[in-house]
Image (cartoon, grey):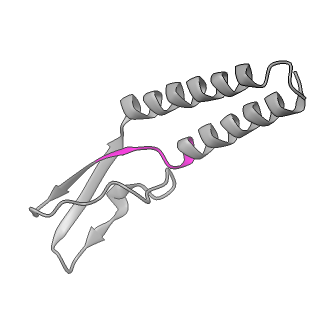
Amino acid sequence: MNKKQKAVIISAGVIIFASVLFPPWDIETKNSRDSIPPGDYSIFHPPSDKVDEYHDYEVSGHISFERLFLEWVLIGIVAGGGFWVFTGKQ
């Protein structure tokens, strides 16, 4: 394994770690017709902790494990392609 392949593997690991810290969420709102963008929620501050009194809605959500698994598969495919591209190159 050369340096570029190691960099690809380390980069994939960092991206997977980030996807665990900020997983995709399925978000539901109660008492509102507004839609909430499913972003900027970490595992330490899930959307169930958010209440917006101005718009009078409560936000709840859970991790979308299907999309998280799909992210990991795509990261693995891209990392595998990068690993293969850098085979034999220094």
Magenta residues, start to end: 20-26
Which residue sits at x=78%, y=25%?
86
Horizontally, is 79 left or right of 44 in the view? right
Q: Is 25 one of the magenta-colored residues?
A: yes
Q: Quarter of the image containing the N terminus?
A: top right
Which residue sits at x=39%, y=33%?
67
Viewer-side residue, 24 vs 90: 90
Q: Is residue 40 above or below residue 67?
A: below
Horizontally, is 32 left or right of 85 in the view? left
Horizontally, is 82 left or right of 4 in the view? left
Looking at the rendering, which quadrant does residue 10 occupy? top right
Total count of labels: 0
Which residue sits at x=33%, y=56%?
48
The percent coordinates of residue 14 (x first, y second) are 68, 42
Viewer-side residue, 12 vs 35: 12
Q: Is residue 59 above or below residue 54?
A: above
The percent coordinates of residue 70 (x first, y second) are 44, 28
Q: Is residue 59 above or below residue 71?
A: below
Which residue sits at x=22%, y=77%?
53
Viewer-side residue, 17 vs 52: 17
The percent coordinates of residue 12 (x first, y second) are 67, 35
